[in-house]
Amino acid sequence: MAVTPPELSPEDQRRRRRRSLAIAIVLGGLVVLFYAVTIAKLGPQVLQRPL
Amino acid sequence: MTTASNTLADSRTLAAAQASQQVSQGDVADYVALLKPRVMFLVVFTALVGMVVTPATAHPVIAFASLLMIAVGAGASGCLNMWWDADIDAVMTRTMKRPIPAGKIRPDEALAFGLTLSGGSVLVLGLVANWLAAGLLAFTIAFYAVIYSMWLKRATPQNIVIGGLAGALPPVVAQAAATGRVGLESLVLCAIIFIWTPPHFWALALVKSGDYARAGIPMMPNVAGPDSTRRQILAYTLLLAPLGMAPAALGFGGLAYAAVSGLGGFGMLLLAWQVFRLREGEAAVKVPQKLFAFSILYLFALFATLLAEHAFGLFRPVLG
């Protein structure tokens, strides 16, 4: 039995776009946070290695 | 039989598919409201103080990430609380415009949001800081969402006394995140918030007892009566005033903290005494309102003074 997708009103679409944008911003923030934490945890020793 | 059960399974699958295809009515602001941002701010503030009063400090990035996860965990527990309490929120004037009773966010959306943020905040705090802090954060979320919201709130007038532990734990979680241990400093801060909670909430409950009665929540004024509540407010404030000065006595609150906690504690006692004495007429409503407002200022002043003393180098020891 097929389920028809619901009709989205213009306001529904605007809300969905705003939610998607918020999720994108949060995900981007998490990427920056995890990168910064990784660098902080590794510390300056990461640069001190025999070349 | 087989045909009947197949039909039932089909209809359930269809219902589940239709529910999953319902268009969400929630805007970003509604999801933010689910996190109780004002409570989140207070949690971050008290957690930050729990971090700065500790002699050993964490790397600023680790400290920032830990505070962020504590804030997200607090927001998640607020969200789960709103999911569970949507029925009583709908009948109380203070809460009827929250996203679930207002019909902007479906209960299943709020539950999924709360659970995702709970798991995520605990996991990230464990990876970023340590698993002691993550365990304490998980305990705090579970205590607020399960012990307080699902059990105590509708079962006993001691709901906010015991449930207050969830609101008191953030400094302990923060100290564990920063140092890997739980020390006396954060435990004293936790005790101050814990003992502050009953007079703060009961002052509000004295004024809003009709609201709580309509929702069927057994707050102290509805169960034990206003006179007993006023007596208990005074008793807790008698404990709170000296406890508020404990950081100065233990050496991690300086001269400014001693002055602020002494004056603030005196103000709390004065108002609690007035709440106890003035039981008739306009004063019976106005004085508890004053105590409620002053109690927020009092707690904020205590923690802001500790923050100023430790984070901005204003610490001057009480002795010597």
Image: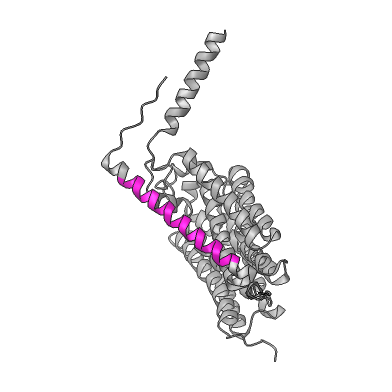
Residue B105 falls left or right of residue B150:
left
Between B14 and B136, the one lying in front of the other is B14
**Residue B85 visible in the shown view:** no
* Quarter of image, res A50: bottom right
Q: Quick check: B252 left or right of B23?
A: right
Quadrant containing the N terminus of chain B in the rendered view: top right
Measured along the vertical axis of the image, is residue B135 above or below residue B89?
below
Q: Residue furthest top?
A: B1
Outermost front residue: A51
x then y, percent, for residue B182: 72, 66
Image quarter hosting the C terminus of chain B: bottom right
**Residue A37 among those drawn in magenta:** yes
Q: Position of residue A17 (x, y in %)?
A: 34, 48
At x 57%, y 64%, the residue is B65
Q: What residue span does the magenta drawing correspond to?
A: A14-38
Residue at screen point 64% across, 69% down: A42
| Residue in view at x 39 percent, y 40 percent | B24
Q: Nearer the viewer, residue B236 or B33?
A: B33
In the displayed structure image, the side of residue B30 where residue B316 appears, left or right: right
Q: Main secondary structure of the magenta part?
A: helix
Tell which of A20 and B211 is nearer to you: A20
The quarter of the displayed image where residue B253 is located: bottom right
Q: Position of residue B311 (x, y in %)?
A: 57, 79
Rendered location of residue B174, percent (x, y): 63, 65
Residue B158 colored magenta? Answer: no
Residue at the farthest bottom position = B320
Indicate whether B164 appears above or below A44: above
